[in-house]
Amino acid sequence: MLNLARNELYRLFLSPLAWVILALSQALLAYLFLSHLDYFMQIQSQIAAIPGAPGVTEMIVAPLLGNAAIVLLLISPLITMRLLAEERRNESLPLLTSAPLTAAGVVMGKFLGSFAFLLILLFMVLLMPLSLLLGSHIDLMQLASGALGLLLLIASFMAIGLFLSSLTRQPAIAAVATFSLLFFLWIVDWAGQSGHDDAGWLGWLSLLKHFEPLLQGELYTADVAYYLIVTVTFLLLAIRKLDNERLTG
């Protein structure tokens, strides 16, 4: 399983797409980070005398992590689309499933490889707010909570994308399906705020609703459990799909 994860990560870095994703995402987030920093420096003298005024963490770090979540939602389908769909298209999936690895080992290997790639991206993102320590004070606990939220988001994004990639032989279809489902789960909270009697469970399904408290430094076990349930559920669905293919030949 670990060998498969390492090979998957190696294959990602052999692809120009992975390098383009890293470069563009870092360039975009660096621009947004500097924009928030410049705005804060412009108004710092005006809000300094206001009791309880937002500080560096609230006005720079939290918006950066929120922007990073949007970027991860956009790029995750591009990372996961080929995990199993390309194996099926290249007729190599039967060889993979007939190896000594179990279906669970195959799924977890693919998952860990793609997860490690986005962990590298997350580490590069976190270097930006940490650089603020050179000239100011930031709330490290809120930063850690936001980083945990992004980590859980990445895990759920990868699990959903991996499952949808197991359903088709076309990576493009897997990418579109993954983005559609992630986008739906991101905005479904809008329906949860409509005031209808049946809107509460829609709000509970929202990825965004469970991420926002973590972004503000509020760590609730219900939010962590939600992401773990989503991740484990879609990984189990992918394992079940591969198991069925192995049994049916």
Image (spheres, rainbow, N blue to C red):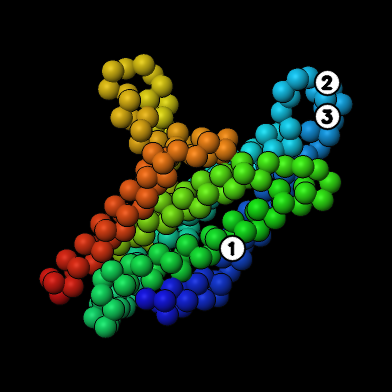
Q: Mark 1 points at which residue?
A: 120
Which dot marks residue 49? 2
- Counting residues from the start of the chain, the first of labels 3 and 1 encountered is 3
Residue extending farthest bottom: 100
Residue extending farthest right: 45
Please name which of the two marks, 3 or 1, marks the residue nearer to the observer: 3
Residue drawn at x 64%, y 38% is 63
Quick check: 188 left or right of 74? left
- Above or below, comparing residue 96 to residue 32 in the picture: below
Q: Residues within 10 Å of mark 2 (few under 14, many from 20)?
A: few
Tell me the amino acid under the disc marked 3: Gln
Secondary structure of the residue carrying tag 1 is helix
Percent position (x, y) of residue 221?
41, 41
Please name which of the two marks, 2 or 1, marks the residue nearer to the observer: 2
Q: Mark 3 points at which residue?
A: 44
Residue drawn at x 69%, y 38% is 57
Disc 2, disc 1: CB below 8 Å? no
- Above or below, comparing residue 230 to residue 239 in the picture: above
